[in-house]
Image (cartoon, helix red, strand yellow):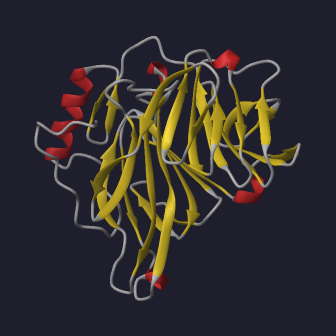
C-alpha cells in the first residue's frame, strides 16, 4: 500500500480457551475508520476433545462481524438466535444497548478432529446508534457481491466500495473487501478510497514503496485516497476502513462506548447479570479485573 503510515503486527492473545492473533486495537492506532477490533483466529488444528467454548458474554456499542475461512462455530445469543457460522458466510450481530452471546464448536464437531480459521471483527456504532435495540443478521456466502479484474477475485464482505454494496446492514460508511489472486496483480483505485484505510495480509506478499510485506500484519495508509499496491501470485488480502467518528471511543473488555460512564454502567450491569441472557446457557464469563485493557 502506497503512503504507509503504520505497520501493525499480530500479537498473541488468549480468548476463552482459544489463542488468537490480535491486530486491533493497537497502542499506536486504536481504530481504522469505525473498525475498533480485529482478531485473526487460527489456523489451528484441534483434536477430538478440543473445542471452541466461549461462554455467554455481553457487548454494547458495536457490531460484531464473524467471517470464517475454515471450520464452524455455533452462535447463540440473547435474542434467541441459534445459527451455525460456516466458511464464507457473515454473522453480523449488533449489540446496541446490550446483547449476550456464546460461541462454541457445534455438536456434530465436538468429538472429531477439526480445524478453525477466520476473522473476528468489531465495528463501533455511531453515537446516534449506540443505544439502539440489539439485532442479528446472517448473510450467506452466495449473497456477497463478487467480481473479477485482471486475474484477481474481489468479494465485498461489508459496506460499499467501487460501485458495489454488501447486503450486510451496516450503520456507518465503511468497507471490508477481500482480494485474492493467482497471478501478480496491481491494485489501483481510480477514485480513491474514503475515510481511513488498512490492509490486512492473510497470506502471500504485498509489494509497496519498494518493500515486500508478508502475512499477519496490517498496513495503515496515511491517506486512503492514494492507496495502491501490488499483490504477488497466491496472495489474499483484506482492505478495510471508512469514515472515522468525530468522538473518541472507550473500550473495556467487550464493551465499546462514547463515554466512560457508559462503560461503568455496563460493567455494573454485567456484575449483577442484568443483561438478557442466552436461553439454556448457564456459564456466563465473569467480568475481568479492572486492570484488564484491550491492547
33 shown above or below 11 = above
> Which residue is at 29% across, 51% downward?
13
Does the image show residue 78? yes
Q: Is residue 167 left or right of residue 7?
A: right
- Residue drawn at point x = 47 percent, y = 20 percent: 128
Q: Locate residue 31: give its quadrant.
A: top left
Q: How many labels, in total?
A: 0
Percent coordinates x, y for residue 258 in the rendering: 34, 20
Task: Name the image quarter holding residue 250.
Answer: top left
Toward the top, the furthest residue is 246
Please state, as top left, top right, bottom left or bottom right, where the C terminus lies in the image: top left
Q: In terms of depth relative to the viewer, which is nearer, 122 or 128?
A: 122
- Picture coordinates of residue 203, whole percent (x, y): 59, 53
Q: Nearer the viewer, residue 240 or 75?
A: 240
Residue at 33% from the left image edge and 70% from the top image edge: 280
Determine whether 114 is above or below 240 in the image.
Answer: below
For the residue pair 3 and 285, the one nearer the viewer reads as 3
The answer to whether residue 169 is seen in the rendering is: no
Quadrant assignment, res 41: bottom left
Residue beneath the point at 27% across and 65% down = 17
Q: Is residue 234 left or right of residue 198?
A: right
Viewer-nearest residue: 41 or 111: 41
Q: Position of residue 59 (x, y in %)?
A: 35, 43
Q: Residue furthest front?
A: 210
* Residue 21 placement (x, y as % from top left): 39, 50
253 relative to 242, above or below: below
Q: Quadrant of the N terminus?
A: top right
Amino acid at each position: 500500500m502506497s503512503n504507509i503510515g503504520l505497520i501493525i503486527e499480530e500479537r498473541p492473545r488468549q480468548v476463552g480457551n482459544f489463542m488468537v492473533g490480535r491486530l486491533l486495537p493497537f497502542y499506536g492506532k486504536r481504530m481504522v475508520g469505525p473498525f475498533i477490533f480485529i482478531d485473526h483466529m487460527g489456523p489451528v488444528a484441534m483434536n477430538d476433545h478440543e473445542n471452541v467454548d466461549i461462554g455467554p458474554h455481553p457487548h454494547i456499542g458495536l457490531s460484531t462481524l464473524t467471517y470464517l475461512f475454515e471450520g464452524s462455530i455455533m452462535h447463540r445469543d440473547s435474542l434467541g438466535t441459534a445459527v451455525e457460522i460456516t466458511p464464507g458466510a457473515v454473522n453480523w450481530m449488533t449489540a446496541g444497548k446490550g446483547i449476550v452471546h456464546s460461541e462454541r464448536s457445534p455438536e456434530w464437531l465436538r468429538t472429531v478432529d477439526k480445524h478453525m480459521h477466520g476473522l473476528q471483527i468489531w465495528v463501533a456504532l455511531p453515537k446516534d446508534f449506540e443505544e439502539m435495540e440489539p439485532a442479528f443478521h446472517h448473510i450467506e456466502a452466495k449473497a456477497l457481491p463478487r467480481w473479477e479484474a485482471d486475474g484477481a477475485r474481489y468479494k465485498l464482505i461489508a459496506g460499499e466500495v467501487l460501485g458495489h454494496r454488501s447486503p450486510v446492514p451496516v450503520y456507518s460508511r465503511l468497507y471490508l473487501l477481500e482480494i485474492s489472486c493467482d497471478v501478480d496483480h496491481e491494485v489501483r483505485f481510480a477514485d480513491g478510497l474514503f475515510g481511513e484505510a488498512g490492509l490486512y495480509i492473510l497470506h502471500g506478499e504485498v509489494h509497496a514503496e519498494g518493500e515486500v510485506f508478508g502475512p499477519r500484519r496490517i498496513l495503515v495508509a496515511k491517506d486512503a485516497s492514494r492507496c495502491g499496491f501490488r499483490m504477488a501470485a497466491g496472495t489474499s488480502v483484506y482492505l478495510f476502513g471508512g469514515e472515522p467518528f468525530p468522538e473518541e471511543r472507550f473500550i473495556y473488555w467487550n464493551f465499546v462506548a462514547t463515554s466512560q460512564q457508559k462503560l461503568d454502567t455496563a460493567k455494573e450491569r454485567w456484575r449483577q447479570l442484568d443483561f438478557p441472557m442466552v436461553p439454556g446457557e448457564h456459564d456466563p464469563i465473569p467480568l475481568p479485573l479492572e486492570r484488564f485493557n484491550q491492547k
